[in-house]
Image (cartoon, helix red, strand yellow):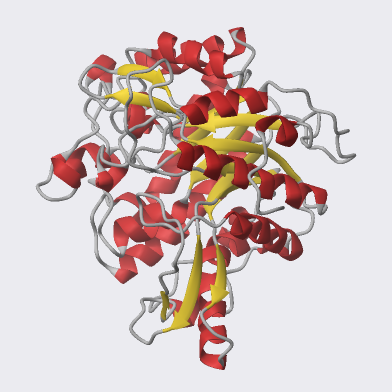
Amino acid sequence: MSDSVPTARSLASRAPAAWVWGAGTAAAQIEGSVAADGRSPSIWDTFAALPGRTANGDTPTVACDHYARVDEDLDLIAALGLDAYRFSVSWSRIVPTPGGRNPRGLDFYDRLVDGLLARGVAPYVTLYHWDLPQWAQDRGGWTNRDTVDRFAEYTDVVAAAIGDRVAAWTTVNEPAVSVFAGHLDGIHAPGVRDAQAAVHAMHHTLLAHGTAVEVLRRAPEAPVGLSLNLAHGDPASDSPADMRALERWTTWKNWLFLDPVMSGRYPDALGALLPHDPPVHDGDMARIATPIDFLGVNYYTRAVIADDADGGPSRSRSVLQTGPHTAMGWEVHAGGLHSLLRAVHERYPSLPMIVSENGSAWDDVVTGAEVAVEDRERTDYLLRHVDATLSAVEDGVPVRGYFAWSLMDNFEWSEGYDKRFGLIHVDYPTGRRRWKRSAVTFRDMVTAPRAVADPPDSVPGT
């Protein structure tokens, strides 16, 4: 990597021939139509309807209206030249009641998958991106072990419907966020603040992942993985206290969920991080460690860590740095992605990876021109982080693809519609989609020639 911003064409020339360029979305963030065609509420519909839970009281009721505009959005995906599109399935659209099945919901994803394939785009399907059905939450949600079995049933239904055409599966996206933001900090759905609930939700979500992998192995063969939000950390100083704080933070941020999946055990430091033991039954850890084909790495920023006895479970705090920060307040640090990919590879050398989310929010200004937003900062972020990813590949790290977050502006959870991550601009009052400069740059990159031979151990479908 260099300090200068690489060009789209120069980056494309470094990508292996089998490299996968993609972009991603999540059902709850884009679909809208929350009561259409038999869908029942999710925990995010319930949570966002409560006063003060989201910015401006925003809800996902309409979102990007993707459910109604799916053909238009498929054409956008094709126009970007993407190899793959990563999307999630709405559990409550498929299973709107306990034990129920909704053919109209399945039909939507059937048409979506067929529409992608007709345009030469590989469907990458995520089964759970935080939108638990409210009926499951009413029974205890992820704190109830029964939810694992309900997730397995849902997985089986989806696999039977579209599994013959899926290029790759992700079982769960960013479980650390849905678990801890939703059950410890209470800032995401379902809005719980209880350490024991968080520990139970952690274990059951991991167990649901492992159980879903087993179910998907019975479907037509396609790679199966999960996506974790990981980050690189640097110490605030070389003091022993800060170095120990960094070690605790890294375990909390990166290994708490990855170690059980890869090694069948929680990190040794678990007891120092959380005040309760997970409800492990015989056979649970082996099921959680059911082998996966790839890891999705979601990366947005790094952290500079200092010791702080009052700093949450890891007893640390992030020290604000100078330099550019996104609209989320996150430091722009592409080198952290390169370091993170190397660190994961060093810990688990045989694990293939994709960068399944990487992107940035900025205060976009619509110009009204053909390219509606001249988002120089997002474009610069994109190019630098692709450069970091390809540099890791050149260092021997088995990364197989890069997915930009997000295809379009969307409902950004508790941030509502204030924060825009999209390559495509969405005018929420009208639903109009317009291109940003970052979208043009990404298109130029993904459609440019690739000149590097494939690595010998490429993973089919990833």
Regarding residue 171, the answer to whether it shows in the image is: yes
Residue located at (14% from left, 41% from top): 57
Near-viewer residue (268 or 405): 405
Note whether 70 is above or below 101 in the view shown.
above
Q: In this orientation, which residue lies closer to the viewer: 70 or 9? A: 9
Q: Position of residue 176 (x, y in %)?
A: 44, 57
Q: Is residue 152 visible?
A: no
Give residue 163's position: percent from left, percent from top.
Answer: 59, 23
- Outermost residue on the left side: it is 51
**Viewed as shown, does residue 421 lie left or right of 297?**
left
Residue 431 percent coordinates (x, y)? 28, 18
Q: Is residue 26 left or right of residue 21?
A: left
Of the 4 image quadrants, the one containing the C terminus is: top right
Q: Is residue 319 above or below residue 409?
A: below
Q: Is residue 63 left or right of residue 274?
A: left
How many callouts does the rendering have? 0
Position of residue 280 in the picture relative to residue 320 (left or right): right
Along the line of sight, which residue is nearer the eye, 184 or 79? 79
Q: Residue at left 39%, top 63%?
A: 200
Q: Could you say which quadrant of the image residue 371 lies in? A: top left
Where is residue 85? Give x, y as percent: 55, 26
Q: Residue lying furthest bottom in this view?
A: 240
Q: Establish if 96 lies above or below 209.
A: above
Q: Residue at x 64, y 56 (%)?
A: 289
**Residue at 51% over, 35% down:** 126
